[in-house]
Image (cartoon, rainbow, N blue to C red):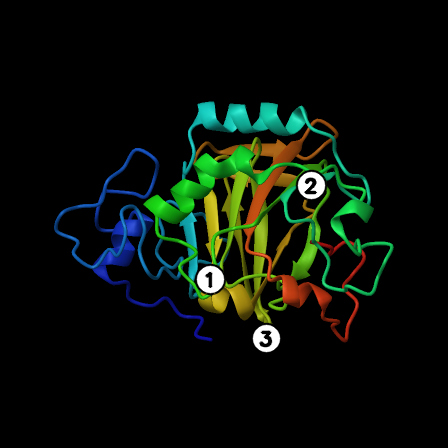
Amino acid sequence: MATTESTLSSTEKCCCGGDDSSSMSTSSTPSNSISTIVEPHMVEYNSLTGCKELFSTNPKVVVPGAIYIKNYISEEEEERIMKLIDSKAWCHEICRRTQMYGYTYYHTRHNLPTMQPVNESSSNYQHLDLKEFDWLIERLVERDGLYKTDYGNPTQCLVNEYIGTQGISSHVDNPGPFGDIITLVSLNKPIYMVLKLASNENIQTKILLEPRSLFVMKDDSRFKWKHGITHMKQVYVPSTGETLIRDENYRRVSLTFRFIKTDGTKKVTNEDPNADALW
C-alpha cells in the first residue's frame, strides 16, 4: 500500500472539500460540472487523502475505499437519535454499553456461548426494531447509493457507547458474517479512530470522527485495514483549537450499520479476538 499522497480526481476533490467548494453533507448538492458522481451526494471512490474536511495525524497515508462525510446528519437528527437510544435498555455483556437494532449478532466466534447467542431468544439484548432507523438507512441506501453489493441493505444497527477513555482494539470486521460495506455515524463527542494496514501495521494514521459525521468502509478499507477507537485521554479538535478531556463526563455514541450474512454467523474462525475487541 502506498504511503505517499496520491493525486485526486476532480470528483474526489469535490467530495473531500478540495478544489471544489462543495462538500458532502445533508445540505449540499454536487456541482453540475461533475459528471462522474454515480449517485447524489456520493462518489464511487475516496481514499481520504487530501480531504480538507478530515483531520488525519498522518495525511500522507492512503486508505482506499474509505469515505468521510462531515455533518451527515443535522443537530436535530442527532438529538432525536440520542433521545431514542437513551429511552431503550442497554446491554452490559461487554466492557461498554451496547444496543442492537435488527439482527442480533456481534461476535466473530459462534462457538463462544457466553458471548454469542445461539438464537435471538437466548440473547440478553432487548429486541429493538431496526425500523427506528429506516429514515437513516434510506438516506444511506436510496439517496447516497451505498450498500449496492451482492447482499443487501443493512439488517443491523449496533450502538456503542464510550464513556471516559473506553475504546476498542484495532480489528477487521469478520467478512464471514458481515457484509462488504460498513457505515459508522458518530454522535455527541468527537473521537480519534486509528486505521492500520493489516499487512503492515507500521502504516497507520488516526482520523478525527466528529459528531454527526459518517465514516464508510468499503473495498480495501473494509478488508485490508484495521480500525479501532483509541484510549487516548485527550481529544484535540483542530477546527476549534479545543482539547477535550476524556473524563467521566465524556460520552460518545456510535451507530454501526451492517448487513448480516446469516450463513456466516455459523462459521468459526481460528483466532480469538482481544477481550476489548468484540464488535
Q: Residue 218 carries which label?
A: 1
- Residue 165 at x, y percent in the picture: 72, 41
Mark 3 or mark 2, which has the lower sequence index?
3
Element assignment for label 1:
loop
Disc 3: which residue: 200
Element assignment for label 2:
loop
> Which residue is painted at 34% across and 39% down in the image?
25
Residue flagged by tag 2: what amino acid is it? Lys
Q: Quadrant of residue 248?
A: top right
Check the image and report above or below for 24 versus 261: above
**Other-residue count near label 3 (Cα within 10 Å), few / some / many at <14 / 14–19 / ≥20:** few
Q: Are marks 3 and 2 in contact (CB under 8 Å)?
A: no
Q: Which residue lies furthest to the left in this view?
A: 33
Mark 2 or mark 1, which has the lower sequence index?
1
**Other-residue count near label 2 (Cα within 10 Å), few / some / many at <14 / 14–19 / ≥20:** few
**Other-residue count near label 1 (Cα within 10 Å), few / some / many at <14 / 14–19 / ≥20:** many
Mark 1 or mark 3, which has the lower sequence index?
3
In depth, the one of 248 and 85 nearer the eye is 85
- Tell me the CA gap for discs 3 and 2: 26 Å
Residue flagged by tag 1: what amino acid is it? Lys
Q: Residue 207 carries which label?
A: none
Please indicate, yes or no, whether residue 109 appears anywhere in the rendered image: yes
Disc 2: which residue: 233
> Which residue is painted at 63% across and 29% down in the image?
85
| Residue depth check, mark 2 versus mark 1: number of the one nearer the observer | 1
- Tell me the CA gap for discs 1 and 3: 19 Å
Check the image and report above or below for 228 versus 75: below
Residue flagged by tag 3: what amino acid is it? Asn
> Which residue is painted at 41% across and 46% down in the image?
140
